[in-house]
Amino acid sequence: MSCSVSRITKSLFFSLAGTLAIFTVGCVQSAKIEEAGTSQPADQAKPVVETSSQAQFVAHENKSNFVSEITFAKNKSTLSSAAQKSLATELEKAAKSQTLEEVKIIAWSDMEYPSVHTQKLSKAQRDLAENRTSNIEKFLKTKGLSAKVEQINMAERPNALERFFNSEDARIKKSLEIAGVPNTDTAVKSPSKAAKAIVVFIPKE
């Protein structure tokens, strides 16, 4: 009788052990399947480059879906690798979509847009903004850009003649003011545009 009980006990032990092993393997496999289902491939997990509402507003005003907003290091006019990548990517997308008619390059110095009382920043700041627009244009041309380029220097306000004739420079700056860019007299400098540049790629209609 004792032998029979022993055999039954061993049988139950091995049966339970087998069931537990199958359950454990099943849980591990299930966890792996769920993990595989939720994880993203490396090429789908790339960061998204976002542009400000002001950049999007100017792009919309110019009937374009292609705009890049970049940042410069303080007192520098050279393009960072991240800025180059952003510009090259947007240029490629725009060129593939439609023939480009014009590119507007809007660059700030290391200060906000001058107020109506300031009118223009120091020569050093104006030169810095100009060098930034020029370097962006040079870079885009190395990438095959052949469209017309309009450079907008955000270190100075449009003069009376430009305002009277509603020049492109005056129009763009007015659009940005409507969009809410701060100036040197604005108490809250947010969102700051100092050391920024907005580049709008405008296709032919």
Image: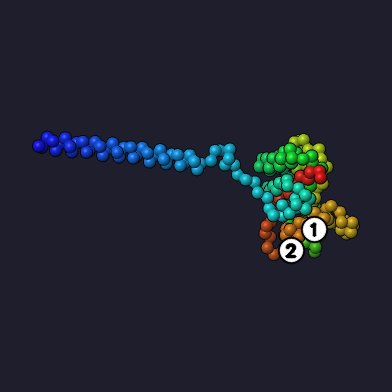
Q: Name the mark on residue 174.
A: 1
Left or right of 160? Residue 105 is left
Specify few, some or many for label 1: CA neighbours under 10 Å numbering under 14, 14-19, or 20 or more. Answer: some
Colouring scheme applied when the structure was drawn: rainbow
Q: Tell me the quarter of the picture where residue 161 sits.
A: bottom right
Quadrant of the drawing holding the C terminus? top right
- Front residue of 71/172: it is 172
Left or right of 64? Residue 26 is left
Q: Name the secondary structure under disc 2.
A: loop
- Front residue of 152/20: it is 20
Residue topped by disc 2: 185
Nearer the N terminus, badge 1 or badge 2? 1
Q: What residue appears at the point 80 percent right and 64 percent down from the top-left corner? A: 117
Say above or below: 111 vs 10: below
Q: Tell me the quarter of the picture where residue 100 sits.
A: top right
Say above or below: 30 vs 187: above
Which of the two marks, 1 or 2, is nearer to us in this view? 1
Residue type at the position of mark 2: Asp
Q: What residue appears at the point 77 percent right and 53 percent down from the top-left corner? A: 61
Residue type at the position of mark 1: Lys
